[in-house]
Image (spheres, rainbow, N blue to C red):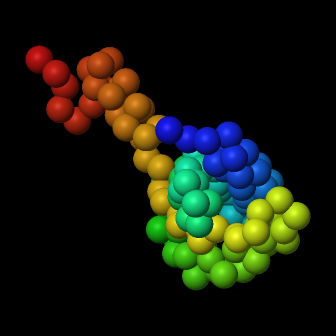
Amino acid sequence: MESNRQRKVAQIIQEDFAELFRKQAADSLQNFLVTVSDVKVTADLGIAKIYLSIFPQEFRKSIMKEIEENKAQYRNFIGQKMAKQVRVIPQLNFYLDTSLDDVEKLERELRGEGDNPVL
């Protein structure tokens, strides 16, 4: 079960990264959207798992690659934001969240528009 402390740290990380990614998308010449769909923090606050939704799909690989390459800068960024609230800045692990794609695919199949309509 998640503690209040874990939830609070996760919420701070989620809000700060949502704002950062929004600014980066606005400054980019390409039209894309990066949404922080969820953040899970381990009990010792040592690791933060950050789940991202990226649209449109064709940007996913390149954006995830760029995020992985800049993980140290992102940890520094969150460290500056959270310096007064935690002793140890968590390691950041980024994951692609495809749950919305799964929902969309299921809805298409239920409407009979999928690749393999249900008989």
28, above or below 53, in the image: below
6, above or below 85, in the image: above
* Residue 47 placement: quadrant: bottom right
Image spot of residue 32 (x, y percent): 65, 56
Q: Nearer the viewer, residue 105 or 52?
A: 52
Q: Is residue 113 found left or right of 2 in the rendered image? A: left
Q: Nearer the viewer, residue 7 or 116?
A: 7
The residue positioned 47% from the left and 68% from the top of the image is 61
The residue positioned 16% from the left and 21% from the top of the image is 118
72, above or below 104, in the image: below
* Total numbered labels placed on residues in the image: 0
Image spot of residue 17 (x, y percent): 73, 58
Quadrant the C terminus occupies? top left
**In this view of the protein, can residue 37 be seen by the observer?**
no
For this orientation, the residue located farthest to the right is 84
Image spot of residue 27 (x, y percent): 82, 65
Q: Is residue 44 found left or right of 8 in the rendered image? A: left
The residue positioned 66% from the left and 81% from the top of the image is 72
The residue positioned 58% from the left and 60% from the top of the image is 44
Q: Is residue 106 found left or right of 40 in the rendered image? A: left
**In this view of the protein, can residue 17 be seen by the observer?**
yes
Q: Is residue 4 found left or right of 104 in the rendered image? A: right
For this orientation, the residue located farthest to the left is 119
Image spot of residue 75 (x, y percent): 70, 74
